[in-house]
Image (cartoon, rainbow, N blue to C red):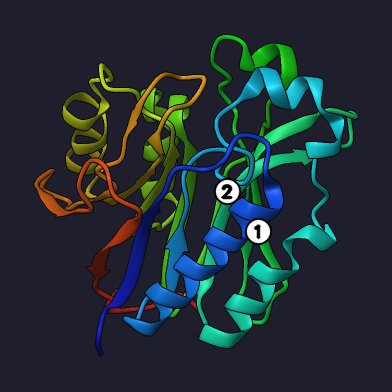
Amino acid sequence: MAGVIIAAAQFAPLAGEIKTNVRTVSGLIRQAGAEGARVVVFPELALTGYEPTLVGATPDSWLGEADARLEPIREACRETGAVAVVNGPVLRTEGRPGVTSLVIGADGELLARYDKTHLYGVEAEVFEPGSADGRFTVDGVRFALATCYDNRFPDIAERAAADGCTVYLASSALDADNDSFEEVYPVRAREFGLYVVLADLVGLSEAGPCVGRSGGWGPDGERIADAGPDREGFALVEVPVPVDPLP
């Protein structure tokens, strides 16, 4: 059986411009789907840009799970048959948003949700942390979700491996001085035998200038895909279907 192709997407969001960013996300889903991608993962706060202070001051930027502003993304998923992992400020029951990955299925319906559990710096003033792991399955391959600073905590990847996950998806916003490319993502892959797939922002953000390089690491910790540092687009990572695929 052929493997499952994952697209690690990157672009430079416009700060606070949800409609424009949704249009870019939808376009990348269509492009990646045309190249066979079954899952397309996007960076941290791709829907608003990584702008926690702006998001905190602009409640209109807080999304709901069924938000009509996300309909173009749902339509792109239905058209391509791809699953999209899109990250933005999504309301929680506590009344504040999470740094949330919504997993939109190939039918346009919500497949899973993950709220970042380890908030970093100013994020704690704006967002509510999550408390549950994120999981979903596509074509027999089980996926785990994590967001940026989460990846500094190895227990998340350890639980993913113990739970039968093959792929660990990391939505991130990494500045030029971040050491995660060498000290975090390949280490998580090697320590726990996972395919690690990173989607990182490009361009200016509240975190500083983000450097892209979205792509993946194999279970041996070696780089297997890299989208480069400064262009909009994606890198493709193919992972094998387990011998006993999950339903």
Give the percent coordinates (x, y) of residue 182. Answer: 16, 28
Is residue 64 positioned above or below 58 on the image? below
**Amino acid residing under circle 2:** Gly
Give the percent coordinates (x, y) of residue 8. Answer: 35, 56
Residue position marked by numbered label 2 in the rendering = 134
Q: Quadrant of the N terminus?
A: bottom left
Is residue 8 positioned above or below 152 on the image? below
Locate residue 120: give its quadrant.
top right
Q: Earlier in the sequence, mark 2 or mark 1?
A: 1
Q: Is residue 116 left or right of residue 220?
A: right
Give the percent coordinates (x, y) of residue 156. Answer: 44, 35
Give the number of callouts.
Answer: 2
Q: Give neighbour class at mark 1: few <14, some 14-19, many 20+ (Cα, 10 Å).
A: some
Tell me whether circle 2 and circle 1 mark residues in contact (CB < 8 Å): yes
Question: Closest to the observer: 1 or 82?
Answer: 82
The residue positioned 44% from the left and 69% from the top of the image is 39
Please, what secondary structure does the residue beneath circle 2 have? strand
The residue positioned 53% from the left and 84% from the top of the image is 81
Please, what secondary structure does the residue beneath circle 1 have? strand
Residue 140 visible, this angle:
no
Residue 143 visible, this angle:
yes
The answer for how far apart the CA atoms under marks 2 and 1 are is 7 Å
The residue positioned 25% from the left and 69% from the top of the image is 239
Residue position marked by numbered label 1 in the rendering = 112
